[in-house]
Image (spheres, rainbow, N blue to C red):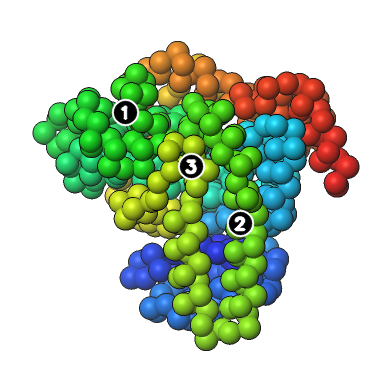
Amino acid sequence: MRLTILGGGGFRVPLVYGALAGSEITELTLYDTDPVRLGVIRSVLAGLPPGPRVRVADGLDDALRGADFVFSAIRVGGTAGRVRDERLPLAEGVLGQETVGAGGVLYGLRTVPVAVRIAERVAAVAPEAWVINFTNPAGTVTEAMASVLGDRVIGICDSPVGLVRRAARAAGADPDAVAYDYVGLNHLGWLRSLTAPDGRDLLPGLLADSAALGSFEEGKLFGAEWLRALGSIPNEYLHYYYFRRETLDAVRAADETRGEFLDHQQGEFFARAAEHPQRARELWEATRLEREETYMADSRAASGGWQRDSCDLDGGGYDRVALALMRAIASGAGTRLILNVRNGGTVPALPADAIVETVCEVDARGARPLRGAPLGEAELGLMLQLKAVERATVEAALFKDRDAALRALALHPLVDSPAVAARILSAVSAEA
């Protein structure tokens, strides 16, 4: 089988390559618009244990032609674009983050047109290929690509499976042996049950055990009192919503935004690795570890200040999620994964074509969402509001519609005024 990675010069590509060792993927094609970054990543791959044969494509169509799977991991505007997405909202006193709040909307506005053009080329050049989208904001981008590719585009994220694995370990269970009910949108979901092989739901016991909750990332972020009040364990990104004041204060007090940190860190890595290609793997490993250790530092600062431990660092791994997804489709063997797919009737209050993030059955036909327990009013309300934001973002990006862009920003729960939203849009236009 052949896999193509769009964004082949991206920092996380070596994780995917490592996961492919011994898999059914025999050829890996890389495509990137930045030849320097692509050259560095090839140097990193050369230092890893042998995997599939690596080919560098001459252009987008060349990269897509003959692919069985297309992994989309692009970053339109680079890390400098993320810096702007975060700083412009912060200047107006509202949260700026890569996928959440005004920052996520701005990133979506810039990314959706490029993602849709990619989807159109896939449909023309490789209509039988499956597209696995990891481009952020993943829910918005997957929804836009699905308007062209339908069910042949599937969004992935490592946050939900990481939550399941951490919660299972905290409950004293084997993460590979539990079943689970998880539903929401990308970066806005809830773990609502955790079922042992004997049929027992382990979640109530975990929620009642303050020490166990304090042993893993989400328990530390949200606190035992709030988790018990919710009766579920939210995705880590919901910290921005539930503790918006504390998180905003932490972000504004920090010396730099997450985007600025990554811009400096990755810029230094690529420059040093380009100069010393024989050290590329060593430099990449050190940079990757620092990146993981500092993940969601603002939320951790807002929840008391604590360092990630080995349990927190050992999440699901989007590379492993992608490999499990490809294997299930290629072999036809059924598996269950948390994925971003079209809703169908999974959440009756949402349109059938809306992308949701939930437990899916995966086989040769693709991924089909499984119906879970009904959503509570609070969770459904957030999902409905954020889905309206996502769909307005897609409309604004595709049709250059300022009114839709204004709705997307102003309706977001973390943007507190249409006037603020209008000023952010004006600032974006002034910088364009």
Chain-order first, disc 2 or disc 1: 1
Residue at mark 3:
301
Q: Is residue 321 visible?
A: no
227 vs 103, left or right, is left
Return the mark for residue 261.
Answer: 2
- Give how far apart the Cα atoms at labels 2 and 3 are: 16 Å
Measure the alpha-carbon separation of dots 2 and 1: 31 Å
- Residue under label 1: 224
Is 66 left or right of 17, judged from the image as shown? Answer: right
What's the residue type where badge 3 is placed? Ala
Residue 81, compared with residue 230, is above or below; it is below
Q: Quadrant of the N terminus?
A: bottom left
Please report the residue visible at 48 percent of the width from the left and 77 percent of the height from the top: 281
Q: Amino acid at mark 2?
A: Phe
Residue lying at 71% horizontally and 28% vertically, measured from the top left? 409
Disc 1 is placed on an element classified as helix
Residue pushed farthest left? Answer: 198
Q: Which mark is residue 406?
A: none
Instruction: Report helix, strand or loop for mark 3.
Output: helix
Front of the two marks 1 and 3? 3
Q: Position of residue 63 (x, y in %)?
A: 62, 66
Which residue is at 60% across, 65% downward? 266
Mark with earlier residue (2, 3): 2
Tag 1: amino acid: Ala
Question: From the viewer's perspective, is residue 231 above or below residue 75?
Answer: above
Residue 183 place in picture, x, y as percent: 41, 29
The residue positioned 78% from the left and 34% from the top of the image is 424
